[in-house]
Image (spheres, rainbow, N blue to C red):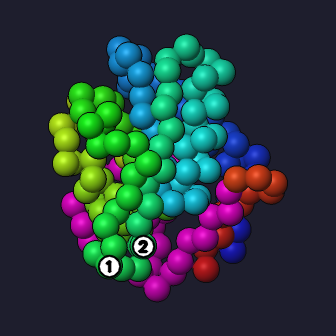
Amino acid sequence: MKILEHKQIEQKVSRLAIEILEHNIEEEGLILAGVNGRGMALAKMLAERIQKISKLPILLTNIRLNPAAPMEKPVEIDLPIAELAGKAIIVVDDVASSGRTLLYACKPILETLPKKLEIAVLVDRTHKSFPVRVDYVGLSLATTLKENILVEIGEGEMSAFLE
C-alpha cells in the first residue's frame, strides 16, 4: 500500500527543511549526515531546500553501516571525526523503525563531542526497541512489527510503501 507519493514527499522534505532551519537558526553551520543510500539522498534533498531559503552553510557526509548486522564491520563516516567536534549534526535516514540503525549510525559521532546531535527521518514508526528519539519527522506511522516500510527516494519518481 502506497503511503506517500512523489508530491507528498517533496512537501514533507520542504517542511522538514524549514523545521531544521528554525531550530538551528543560531548555528554557524550544519552537518547533515545521511545513513547509507536513501538517508544520503534525503540529506541531499534537505540541504538543497535549506540552501534555497537560507545562507546557512551545510556540509554533507555519508554514514555507512550494515543495518542487518551493525557490529559486523565498523561504522564508517566520510568526514574525519575531528571535524565533527563542536558542530551541530543532524543524522538523516529514510525510516526509523526499531531505532537500531540510527543508534549505531550515531556511534562514530559520539567519539567526539558535537555541539548538538539530532535525527531527521522521512517516516517514523512508533515502536522503538532502542533509545532513539527522532527530532524531525515527515510522517509518523503506527505499524505492526511484521509490517515493513520501503522508501524509494532520490532521482526520478519517489514514493513510500507499507508492506
Q: Residue at x 63, y 64 (%)?
A: 151
In the rendered image, is residue 138 in sight? Answer: yes
Quarter of the C terminus within the rendering: bottom right
On screen, residue 109 above or below 48: below
Between 68 and 79, the one lying in front of the other is 79
Mark 1 secondary-structure assignment = loop
Range drawn in magenta: 125-153
Q: Amino acid at mark 2?
A: Asn
Name the disc covering residue 66, or none. 2
Query: Counting residues from the N terminus, which is met first, the one under dot 2 or under dot 1?
Result: 2
Instruction: Judge from the rendering whether residue 87 lies leftward or rightward of residue 146; answer left or right.
Output: left
Q: Are marks 2 and 1 in contact (CB under 8 Å)?
A: yes
- Say which quarter of the image contains residue 131: bottom left
Quarter of the N terminus within the rendering: bottom right
Residue pointed to by mark 1: 72
Between 99 and 145, the one lying in front of the other is 99
On screen, residue 125 above or below 117: below
